[in-house]
Image: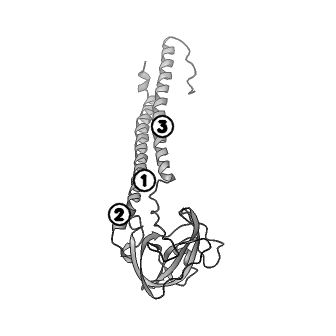
Amino acid sequence: MYRFLTTPRWWGINVFVLLAIPFCLFMGIWQLGRFEDRVDSHQEAEKRPAVQAAEAPAPLAELLPVDKETSGRQAVVSGRYGKQFLVPGRELDGRTGSYVLTLLHTSEDKALPVVRGWLPKGAAAPAPPVGEVTVTGALQASESPGSKGVHAAGGLPEGQLGIISAASLVNLVPDEVYDAWVTLARSPSGLTPVPAAAATGTGLDIKAFQNLGYTGEWFVFAGFVLFMWFRLVRREAEAERDRALGLEPESQGIG
């Protein structure tokens, strides 16, 4: 009854099924691995602040460029404070205020954005220290407009920034700006320290759950291919049986 499986037409169907099912399973396992990697990365990112807090501060130059490993590390740098900006619309402990960002001019003739702390709405920002200073703070990568908690940079009054990045400062200051910034662990009186943000790409974002969704889809595809093969075989076997009994086989359309 199943001799039709050896016909050229069914050889093509069988080869397709034998290739499609392992491929779907492989892709499902690969997507599951991608999801597990993102979970591991997220767990490592949650543990990293405690590990970084125990590490000795390192010179800024040794931690650049900022990546997932150096983001949040304590950096030490010396220089003189210069121009100061407010970065409004920043939340801390459920309250909305501004970051106080002051440019630190280093011996490399570059300016490093330093977030000296968070300022409540309506309060006056304290002036930065005068003269040579050495600061220690958590290193952060430049923000992008799509970052969490970041507002659009357009339409702000003079002396305010929407995002903390070299690109947002390039037209506001004459100096070359580091593509990074630091947030002080100890802020001056009147300001609240801003905790370091987690490195981008380490959280369980939408991409992680997309990987998990794709895992299910590929396994469903594998099951669907196998289901359709069994269904076609059954219908073909029924048609062969009807022909053997001299009956007119029913339409073999898939439905």
How much space separates mark 1 and mark 3, taking CA atoms?
A: 23 Å
Q: Which residue is drawn at 57% across and 26% down?
A: 253
Residue 101 is situated, as x and y percent measured from the top left of the image, at 53, 76
- Mark 2 / mark 1, whichever is N-terminal: 1
Q: What element carries label 1?
A: helix
Residue 159 is situated, as x and y percent measured from the top left of the image, at 60, 79
Q: In which quarter of the image is the N terminus?
A: top left
Q: Is mark 3 on a helix, strand or loop?
A: helix
Quadrant of the image occupied by residue 45? bottom left
* Viewer-side label of 1, 3: 1
- Mark 2 / mark 3, whichever is N-terminal: 2
Disc 2 target residue: 51
Q: Residue at x 42, y 37 (%)?
A: 21
Disc 1 target residue: 38
Q: What residue type is labelled 1?
A: Arg
| Label annotation for residue 173 | none
Residue 172's place in the image compared with 255, above or below, is below
Q: Which amino acid does label 2 sit on?
A: Val
Residue 212 is one of the magenta-drawn residues:
no
Disc 3 target residue: 220
How much space separates mark 2 and mark 3, taking CA atoms?
A: 41 Å
Lateral position of residue 230 relative to residue 54, left or right = right
Neighbours of disc 3 within 10 Å: few (<14), some (14-19), many (20+): some
- Mark 1 / mark 3, whichever is N-terminal: 1
Toward the front, the furthest residue is 189
Q: In which quarter of the image is the C terminus?
A: top right
Which residues are drawn in magenta?
A: 248-255
Residue 252's place in the image compared with 160, above or below, is above
Residue 51 is situated, as x and y percent measured from the top left of the image, at 35, 63
Q: Which of 148 and 242 is in front in this view?
A: 148
